[in-house]
Image (tube, grey):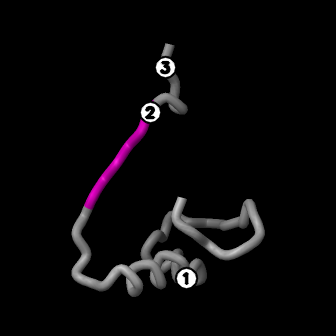
Amino acid sequence: MSGPADRELRAETEVAAPPERVWALLTDLSNLPDWSPELVRMVPLKRGGLRVG
């Protein structure tokens, strides 16, 4: 039987910016509500900086 944990969703888009600029935007969590208005609250699960993975 499959459930929500058995599913994977992927999406891709091309961004006209260097990877460093995109990463800086994605990891600046203080600006996240500006482009994700449904965001209500964020809580870090681990200490340390953000990384890919």
How packed mark 1 is, by other alpha carbons closer than 10 Å (few <14, some 14-19, many 20 or more), is few
Contact between marks 2 and 3 (CB within 8 A): the answer is yes
How packed mark 2 is, by other alpha carbons closer than 10 Å (few <14, some 14-19, many 20 or more), is few
Query: In the image, is residue 4 above or below residue 40?
Result: above
The residue indicated by pointer 3 is 2
The residue indicated by pointer 2 is 7
User: Which contiguous range is marked in magenta?
Assistant: 7-12
Residue 5: image x %, image y %?
54, 32
Q: Which mark is residue 28?
A: 1
Residue 18: image x %, image y %?
31, 84
Residue 12: image x %, image y %?
27, 58
Mark 2 or mark 3, earlier in chain: 3
Contact between marks 3 and 1 (CB within 8 A): the answer is no
Residue in view at x 25 percent, y 64 percent: 13
Q: Amino acid at mark 2?
A: Arg
Secondary structure type for disc 2: loop
Characterize the magenta stretch by its predominant secondary structure: loop
